[in-house]
Amino acid sequence: MECFLLVDDDVAFTKVLARALQRRGLECVCAQSTDQALQLAKQQTFSKAIIDLKMQGPSGLTLIPALKQQQPDIDIVMLTGYSSVATAVEAVKLGAINYLCKPANTNEILAAFEHIEGDIAIDIPEQRPSVDRLEWEHIQKVLAEQDGNISATARALGMHRRTLQRKLNKRPVKE
């Protein structure tokens, strides 16, 4: 039987997703932090992991290579409400097989594990991203390069730390 590792600091979301997977006959173990997830991975073998990007403590990106080192055959899908091109690329580089934006339902999450190869028939949007969206993605890229350090990111962007924090507290700009 496949066993899923769900890693998200949102306890309510984790419980709902775990119940939905269990209704489909899948075993689930939940963790609320990267440290807790790594402890669980030492005790049990998982076939799949669903990891949230932004959690209290270390980011979900730091968990991907650590989990892959402990369990090389694990398939990982990164799930986040703070999506950007930079974090999606980084998650895949680190070993995730797919990257989904919240909100995602159980069917979409399970489909992400099945859809590993690229899709050459994917629709390419005609509309270019807005300046606000490009700014959001650039901030996310620099933040990832600075390992989530807001002060270092503000210095790299040449902006005041409080200004950066205000921008980060806003939802991602819709495309």
Image (cartoon, rainbow, N blue to C red):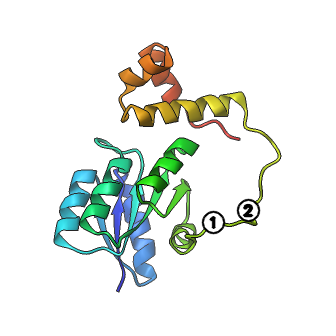
Q: Where residue 112 sits: x, y (%)?
A: 54, 68
Q: Where residue 65 sits: x, y (%)?
A: 32, 56
Count of number-bearing discs: 2
- Seen in the picture, residue 44 relative to 172 is either above or below; the reply is below
Residue wearing tag 1: 118
81 and 71: which one is in front? 71
129 and 13: which one is in front? 129
Dot 1: few (<14), some (14–19), or many (≥20) neighbours within 10 Å? few
* Residue type (three-letter) at the residue carrying disc 1: Gly
Q: Horizontally, is 126 left or right of 59 in the view?
A: right
Quadrant, the N terminus: bottom left
- Which residue lies at the image location 22% right of the left edge and 56% below the top edge? 36
- Seen in the picture, residue 2 relative to 107 is either above or below; the reply is below
- Which residue lies at the image location 21% right of the left edge and 65% below the top edge? 40
- Which residue lies at the image location 72% right of the left edge and 65% below the top edge? 120
Q: Horizontally, is 139 left or right of 131 in the view?
A: left
Residue 124 in sight in this render: yes
> Label 1, label 2: how many angstroms apart (C-alpha)?
9 Å
* Residue type (three-letter) at the residue carrying disc 2: Ile
Q: Where residue 3 sits: x, y (%)?
A: 33, 77
- Seen in the picture, residue 9 relative to 164 is either above or below; the reply is below
Q: Horizontally, is 11 left or right of 166 in the view?
A: left
Q: Nearer the viewer, mark 1 or mark 2?
A: 1
Residue 31 in sight in this render: no
Quadrant, the C terminus: top right
**Label 2 secondary element:** loop
Residue wearing tag 2: 122
- Seen in the picture, residue 160 relative to 111 is either above or below; the reply is above
Residue 32: numbered disc: none
Determine whether label 1 and label 2 are within 8 Å by CB: yes
Image quarter for residue 20? bottom left
